[in-house]
Amino acid sequence: MIPRYSRPEMTAIWEPATKFRIWYEIEAHACDAQAAIGVIPKENAQAVWKAKDVEFDVARIDEIEAVTKHDVIAFLTHLAEHIGADDARFVHQGMTSSDVLDTTLNVQLARAADLLIADMDRVLTALKTRAFEHKDTIRIGRSHGIHAEPTTMGLTFARFYAEMDRGRARLVNARAEIATGAVSGAVGTFANIDPSVEEHVCAQMGLTPEPISTQVIPRDRHAMFFATLGVIASSIENIATEVRHMQRTEVLEAEEFFSKGQKGSSAMPHKRNPVLTENLTGLARLVRMSVVPAMENVALWHERDISHSSVERAIGPDSTVTLDFALNRLAGVIEKLVIYPENMLANMNKFRGLVMSQRVLLALTQAGVSREDSYKLVQRNAMKVWEDGADFKTELLADTDVTAALSSDEIEEKFDLGYHTKHVDTIFRRVFGKS
């Protein structure tokens, strides 16, 4: 990813130097395990660790690869330059390139997942804080973009919290599923390497052994990992879309923080645009772009081919770096989001009580009026509000068919806002627990 949408903590995971360091650790731990079972001399295994403080020369490895046309061989050749050819002859004993490549990729994805989980914790903290801050802040709920019934801004934050919390749980599971390693040799039969080597390497690298690998780790694991990132990205866009709607001039119930000296438009000095959430919408598309290729990587020829390799070299860093940036940007938006409760009330009252129509409908049915007739009575008065700008309660009180079933006090009571918020505490306990 481009630096504009990258954070150093995540990009460091995907740097060539990091990759080669992981390759080295896998090879060195494998040598230890081989020595422990008597396959290679212990002094040769110990000699491999002479390179533990070496900063591998990426340019030199690239130079060797230009000749060998093989990245793992190029690295092993460079490693031999540091520890000596005699000691290096036992490195990679019984292993195949995928043992190094696949195990490394899963180490990187697991480390990336740890950062993403921490990112989601920041988002969840921000959402919870704003939810309790605005638990009782009344705003109009909308369906199809049209006024429906009253809700609260706190419930809006709470539903986003619940969605992100599900995403975090999925990511924790995806991390566990991706954190496997394979050191099983050609076609995965352990013919030339003992399974104990794999067990030792995985333990040292924070992984669990892949139960069965066919020279490559099965790519359904990776498909689920990237699919999980895609769902989280969609949840980011869900929140961003709501903020963008709320910031529209005609709505203005909330807006992104506009800092001192910030400019909204090169042409129109008055503009304050939702640029951060628009950006999040675009970044979500980039993350989701990796999902289908990851799923297409599942089907490989026989025990191994490399059709997945070029895809993963791109989507591994791109998706995790982008999502890491997006989650932190989203957290900042939520933390600083400016809320306008007065505008929320003004918007809700724009159509003078119309949003209480269901309460009147239900009251009429409970008073003995058929549902079909009740609907007609309420709708004919509601249409006067839409078309003539009338006041809904005033029209109901003047409608003799309505007042024949409901007293004026009963009609008045149907316009109590508290009716719509009486179960907010119950919903909050379901989402946040008793805290």
Image (cartoon, rainbow, N blue to C red):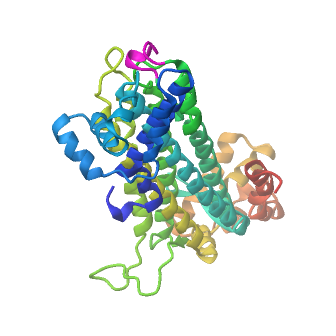
Residue at image position (55%, 21%) is: 37
Query: Picture quarter containing residue 4?
Result: bottom left
Compared with residue 14, is residue 3 higher up or lower down, i.e. above or below? Answer: below
Q: Main secondary structure of the magenta part?
A: loop
Front position in the image: 30 or 72: 30
Q: Which residues are magenta?
A: 184-193
Left or right, 335 with respect to 39, comes to right
> Residue 194's x, y, as percent?
51, 18
Residue at image position (58%, 45%) is: 167
Quadrant the N terminus occupies: bottom left
Front position in the image: 421 or 154: 154
Left or right, 69 with respect to 128, comes to left
Front position in the image: 428 or 180: 180
Query: Picture quarter containing residue 278?
Result: bottom left
Compared with residue 58, is residue 186 higher up or lower down, i.e. above or below? Answer: above
63 in the magenta segment: no
Extreme residue toward the left, this view: 67
> Residue 86's x, y, as percent?
35, 33
Number of numbered tags placed on the structure image? 0
Is residue 241 shown to the viewer in this render? no
> Residue 117's x, y, as percent?
58, 50
> Residue 247's x, y, as percent?
48, 70
Residue at image position (53%, 68%) is: 332
Compared with residue 419, is residue 117 higher up or lower down, i.e. above or below? Answer: above
Quadrant the C terminus occupies: bottom right
Left or right, 426 with respect to 229, comes to right
